[in-house]
Amino acid sequence: MSRGTQPNQIIFQTANIDDKIYIKEQTGKFQKIRRYLASILTIIFIGLPFVPYQGQQAILFDVGAQKLHLFSWILYPHDLLIFVYLFIIAAFALFYISNRYGRIWCGYLCPQTIWSLLFFWLQFRVEGNAQAQKRLDKLPFGASKVIRKGIKHGLWLLVSLFTATTFMSYFLPATQLYSELFTGQLAALYWGWILTFMACTYINAGWIKEKMCEHMCPYSRFQSAMVNEATKQITYDNSRGEPRGPRKLSKPNAQVQIHDAAHEKLHKLSQNKQRTNSLGDCVDCNLCVQVCPVGIDIRQGFQYECISCGLCIDACDQVMSRFNYAKGLIRYHGKVKGKRSHSLAYIGLIGIFSVLFIIWMANRPMFELNIIKDRNVLYRVVDDQRIENTFELKLINKTQLKETFTLSLKGVQGFELVSDKPIEIDADSRTSVLVNVLSPIDHKAKFVPFEFVLRSDNHAISSKSVFHGK
């Protein structure tokens, strides 16, 4: 690829999946942003299972009872349309962010990136920097190498175990989970899931790492359909940086601050007079490549593997400061007056589905009634020649209050309930009641549609059914 590649051109290049990337540890403005965001998200992930709400865990996926506790909401399988709306809204929000700011989700918020960089951080603490890691890998197996590798993988496994246990606390109450875990009473089923999630985390963040972004994540493949000239992408300024080449370090001066395009132009002109061989600002140090978690060279143009993490920007800005050049040779860049139609479309779709979600939530029934007809005996004839049908009423209470309902029939005349005993249902529970319905003596119809109606002081619900005759 020539050095004159356009910044917005997407480069597809073949990567050897067996090549191991040794990244250089980097600090800087964008790394601080990522670490702050990662810390906040990690604290939320760990802490949410310990948030109480009305005497129970605020967020709990109760798989056994087939319900989800979400603060004051209790969702059953037929309520999971809420996730359809949430996923659609989240998808369009991601598309909007991608259209405006590129893959910043991948670089700053994606769990894959957060956990991979955490594993890298542990590796740096145990094995040293990138050069030390290369030397260690080339050494034959001995006591020092085994100890260092053992400590690293031990720490990775501990983080994976903690991650899996935390994830499992969303499905089993956290207090119960940790109590049974530390007392050795945790059921084998839960141990199996914890070990499964632990293995997935360890393999994914410790071994697969950037291969997930390059070869497995579908987002990297279709992102090109969402970017345009207005999208802020990490780009290398060819006009300023080329031709690149090494040079001697200039005397340390006060750090140059560029406030606008005019100042930047004047600064570049003054710097050009000090350079030899008409070299650009790029000193060809390759630090932008050495710090990249996916091992690409951003100077070759925008590539689909790039996760917009900003590591190359921080590395390049530090080098520019050392040479007393203006920062921003590698930067987030997009045309201010570029295309905005896609962004407006995504905002509109987010608004539409948000309104639909609110309407659905406002009209979501707090009680649900399902009627099951007794299929073993469709009807029976009692002594006075009346026909009797048996129905099973299944009632779900999604509120946090106990309710008492009275049962009645609607849409038929002369039909009677064998028992008019009130139906009681506890808060956040289900109940089943068998109900017998008698027809009038002169009933002749084979099928009679009607409704069961349940009424309480605050609610009224109904469900249709059919009475079977001779």
Image (tube, grey):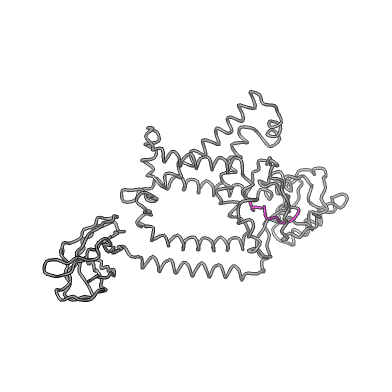
Looking at the image, which residue is at 29% across and 55% down?
428
Looking at the image, which residue is at 65% across and 69% down?
339
Q: Is residue 131 left or right of residue 181?
A: right
Q: How many marks?
A: 0
Q: Position of residue 27 (x, y in %)?
A: 64, 44
465 shown above or below 24:
below
Looking at the image, which residue is at 62% across and 60% down?
101
Q: Is residue 377 left or right of residue 307?
A: left
* 129, 167: nearer the viewer: 167
Q: Position of residue 109 (x, y in %)?
A: 56, 51
| Residue found at the far right of this picture | 277
| Residue found at the far front of this picture | 470
Looking at the image, which residue is at 79% across and 43% down?
251
Q: Quadrant of the N terminus?
A: bottom right
| Residue found at the far left of this picture | 384
Name the main secondary structure of what is drawn in magenta: loop
Q: Is residue 349 left or right of residue 52?
A: right
Q: Position of residue 8 (x, y in %)?
A: 72, 61
Magenta-colored stretch includes residue 301 = yes
Span shown in magenta: 300-309
349 shown above or below 79:
below
* 324, 307: nearer the viewer: 307
Q: Is residue 442 left or right of residue 15?
A: left
Q: Quadrant of the C terminus?
A: bottom left
* 37, 298: nearer the viewer: 298
